[in-house]
């Protein structure tokens, strides 16, 4: 394997029904569990939206003004599947030269000043539409469902940039090498509260577990009083 998308393909071939990403929002009490197959379907739909709906072409840059969320993980893999460079910024500044911006509701006005194409994500745990969609903004939850759950992209270029963050741009080969270098134990269940706009969040909280056949529990608005119980219930092996 030399590209992060191959991690997902490998997981799909090994056991498509096993849990891959579990998401908690302690502010709402929501819990969502996505199998490898379900996660892959969301990735394919999103990649098709990017390419067929928005006309994205390889080497394009997609800014992700999104917190740690299962949909953010989907967007990362969708960008990589389509040969795009993901620029996760979390709550940081949205780059003005991005081709596409995917943003949470509170950042849609800012995003509209920074890109031609803006996709709004409600970040509802179950994928509900935006409560209010500004003019010119594409409502992700509404649009993505129309696209196919198989993505027929071109050959993955492991030497092309896949992510830009923390002042660094990494190719697929470099990103995967850093994820593997963590030596995440086989079958790890990693609980993370760290956004994917940091090396720690992306590598330790998402890609590292996938290199070892593991899975991820993403927690938003964590209620620390229930952390120990969650670690036990979800069979967590490490916390980021």
Image (cartoon, grey):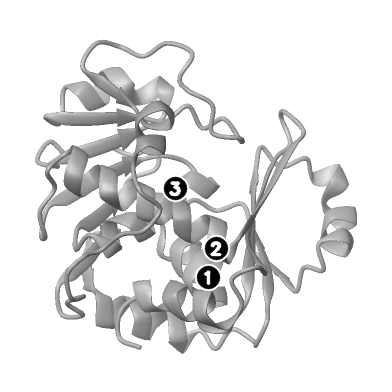
**Residue 91 in sight from this viewpoint:** no
Query: Residue shown at 86%/46% (left/top)?
Result: 226
- How many neighbours does mark 1 have within 10 angstroms: few (below 14), some (14-19), or many (20 or more)? many
Q: Secondary structure at mark 3?
A: helix
Instruction: Determine which residue is flagged by label 1.
Output: 204
**Residues at discs 3 and 2 in contact (Cβ within 8 Å):** no
Q: Nearer the viewer, residue 43 or 97?
A: 43
- How many neighbours does mark 2 have within 10 angstroms: few (below 14), some (14-19), or many (20 or more)? many
| Quarter holding residue 202 | bottom left
Instruction: Identify the mark nearer the N-term, 2 or 1.
Output: 2
Instruction: Determine which residue is flagged by label 3.
Output: 72
Q: Secondary structure at mark 1?
A: helix
Instruction: Determine which residue is flagged by label 2.
Output: 37
| Quarter holding residue 97 | top left
Q: Nearer the viewer, residue 50 or 61?
A: 50
Instruction: Identify the mark nearer the N-term, 3 or 1.
Output: 3
Q: CA distance from mark 3 to mark 1?
A: 15 Å
Instruction: Identify the mark nearer the N-term, 3 or 2.
Output: 2
Q: In the rendered view, tell whether residue 128 sits above or below residue 63.
A: above
- The x and y percentages for residue 174 are 27, 81
């Amino acid at each position: 394997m030399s590209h992060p998308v191959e991690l997902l393909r490998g997981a799909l071939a090994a056991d498509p029904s096993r849990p891959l990403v579990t998401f908690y929002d302690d502010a709402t009490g929501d819990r969502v569990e996505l199998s490898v197959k379900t996660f892959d379907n969301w990735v394919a739909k999103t990649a098709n939206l990017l390419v067929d709906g928005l006309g994205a072409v390889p080497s394009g840059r997609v800014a992700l003004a999104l917190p740690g969320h299962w949909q953010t993980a989907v967007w990362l893999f969708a960008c990589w599947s389509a040969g795009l460079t993901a620029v996760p910024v979390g709550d940081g500044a949205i780059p003005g030269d991005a081709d596409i911006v995917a943003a949470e509701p509170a950042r849609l006005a800012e995003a509209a000043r920074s890109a031609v194409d803006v996709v709004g994500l409600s970040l509802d745990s179950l994928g509900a539409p935006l409560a209010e969609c500004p003019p010119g903004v594409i409502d992700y939850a509404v649009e993505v469902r129309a696209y196919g759950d198989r993505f027929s992209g071109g050959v993955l270029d492991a030497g092309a940039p896949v992510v830009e963050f923390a002042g660094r741009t990494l190719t697929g080969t470099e990103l995967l090498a850093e994820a593997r270098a963590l030596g995440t134990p086989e079958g790890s269940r990693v609980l993370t509260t760290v956004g994917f706009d940091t090396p720690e969040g992306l590598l330790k909280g998402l890609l590292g577990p996938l290199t070892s056949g593991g899975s991820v529990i993403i927690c938003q608005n964590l209620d620390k009083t229930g952390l120990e119980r969650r670690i036990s219930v979800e069979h967590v092996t490490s916390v980021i």
